[in-house]
Amino acid sequence: MTTPRLLIIGCGDVGLRVLKLLAGRWRVFALTSSPERAAALRQAGAVPLSGNLDEPATLVRLAGLADFVLHLAPPAPSGDADPRTRHLLAALSRKPPAALVYASTTGVYGDCGAALIDETRAPSPATDRARRRVDAEAQLRAFGRRHGTRIGLLRIPGIYARDREGGHPRERLARGTPVLRREDDVFTNHIHADDLARACLLALLRVRPQRVVNVCDDSQLLMGDYFDLAADLGALPRPARITRAEAAECMSAMQLSFWSESRRLRNDRLKRELRLRLRYPTPRDGL
């Protein structure tokens, strides 16, 4: 009957939504490397802790602090390994938590074309960003086996919400950014930020040990169709369509990387094992 204790690593938009769901029913600690965020975290209901995943000495106090850990922090911006997760796990290993849930990415699957895939699909990362996530997942699974911690790996696609900074396509539509023509287009996947927060909380309680779960909605949209939908709902002009060759001339390498991978994801585990009922089963509902 004791109050559950949760440690959030990387308490940004999604972490704040988790705090709102808990509404003071859990005791929550939030690690932050920005002292100026302490007041906002405290107001949201968390106990702010100063620490930096790039500085292992600042993480010593995390051991044994909470029975549940929600790891939402991104990996380092370069390389193909994730030292930040390694530093965190070294600190937690002194008194491991009962459960740890990690926010990974569906990018670990690489390009799957039009195939409909589930969590049994072997990772095939094509970018350093995705390789860092695969490395973090491997570290976490090994930690779970070694210490008996129940590890949940949530593979997350594009996150959106009207009230999320940069989380609504209206900004891109307003800039007039083009999209690929249909014959060159790729499938894209989405999850509303509120549904993601609920999935994170349910995973802490229900995920099976060392289990991967795709956290995506029910939609299977081509990227261009997603932006057409957003434009129609917002009474904005639909984006122009261009060829892949034209995109290579006007887009950055980062933008092109998103246009080079196509995935259609199944979310059966999300519904069956975590028992999440999506509030926003399609982007039409969420936008």
Image (spheres, rainbow, N blue to C red):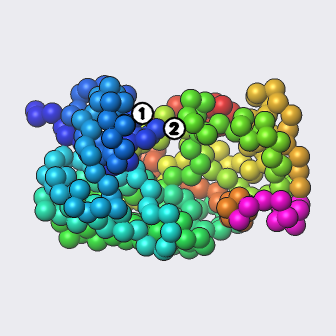
Residue 102 percent across, percent down from the top left: 38, 55
- Residue at 27% x, 46% y: name it: 50
Residue 98 visible to the viewer? no
Q: CA distance from mark 1 to mark 2?
A: 8 Å
Q: Is residue 249 above or below residue 180?
A: below
State the residue at coordinates (32%, 30%).
39
Query: Crowding at label 2, few (<14), some or many (≥20) Cα neighbours within 10 Å?
Result: many
Element type where label 2 sits in the image: helix
Q: Position of residue 155 (x, y in %)?
A: 48, 56
Identify the residue shown where x is 67% and y is 61%.
Answer: 254
The disc at residue 160 is: none
In the rendered structure, which amino acid carries the disc numbered 2?
Answer: Ala
Is residue 248 one of those drawn in magenta?
A: yes
The quadrant holding residue 36 is: top left
Residue of label 2:
193
Q: Position of residue 260 (x, y in %)?
A: 72, 65
- Residue found at the far left of this picture: 1
Query: Which quarter of the rendering shows the C terminus?
Result: top right
Identify the amino acid type marked 1.
Arg
Q: Residue at x 25, y 67 (%)?
A: 143
Disc 1 element:
helix
Label located before the other in sequence (1 or 2)? 1
Residue 126 found in image quarter? bottom right
Magenta residues, start to end: 243-253
Q: Main secondary structure of the magenta part?
A: helix
Q: Which residue is mark 1?
A: 17
- Marks 1 and 2 close (CB-CB < 8 Å): yes
196 to the left or right of 222: left
Above or below, 21 relative to 213? above
Q: Quadrant of the N terminus?
A: top left
